[in-house]
Amino acid sequence: IEWTFLHSFMLQSALPLMLPLLYFSPLLVHASKLYLSGNTSHWSEPFFGHKATKSREWNHAVLKCVRLQIICYQSFTQTVLATFKCTESSEPGIQYLDADPNYRCWTAEHIGLVCLASLMLPLILGLPISLMTVVLRAAKEKT
């Protein structure tokens, strides 16, 4: 099987969305077991503990997700933005995708990729904005 832009796009789009589920699903299973067994009074107690202090496990899961997003960010961003970049061919009015010249732009397949990539744009903008918010909030609390 030949690896194409579509394969790369689907894999890199799925990883940042699906891998956090691997980090949080054990916590959700643990919390549901505690709640269903009657050992806790509220479903959020295993996550946040007493007096709304976050549990150690929750903090580690969030930290793993942030690390994963930072690691995947550059290639994820390049792949998503590559969906929008087309080049005019020698034939007038026909464009091909720069990332993979086998894909003709503005066909049904390409429009589907563009729609999916458009849904990913908030993720591309969200990571730097959320990290900046965390850093500014931490700096404000220090002063």
Image: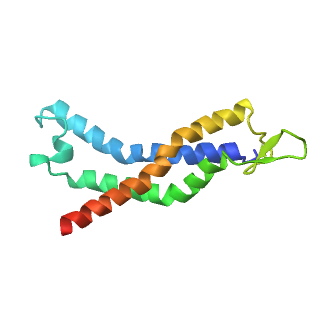
- The answer to whether 106 is drawn above or below residue 80 in the figure is above
Tell me residue 64's x, y (percent): 37, 56
Left or right: 71 as drawn, with respect to 90:
left
Q: Residue at x 29, y 38 (%)?
A: 29
Residue plotted at (65% across, 33% down): 112
| Tally of numbered discs | 0
Q: Residue furthest front?
A: 92
Does 55 appear above or below 119? below
Colour convention of the picture: rainbow
The structure residue drawn at horizontal position 22% and vertical position 64%, both measured from the top left corner, is 140
From the viewer's side, name the closer residue of 43 and 114.
114
Q: Quadrant of the C terminus?
A: bottom left
Q: Nearer the viewer, residue 54 or 97?
A: 97
- Residue 2 in percent (x, y) is at 76, 46
Q: Quadrant of residue 139?
A: bottom left
Apparent side of residue 128 relative to residue 30 in the rendered image (left or right): right
Q: Position of residue 34 (x, y in %)?
A: 18, 37
* Image spot of residue 3 (x, y percent): 72, 48
Compared to residue 66, the image places residue 27 above or below, namely above
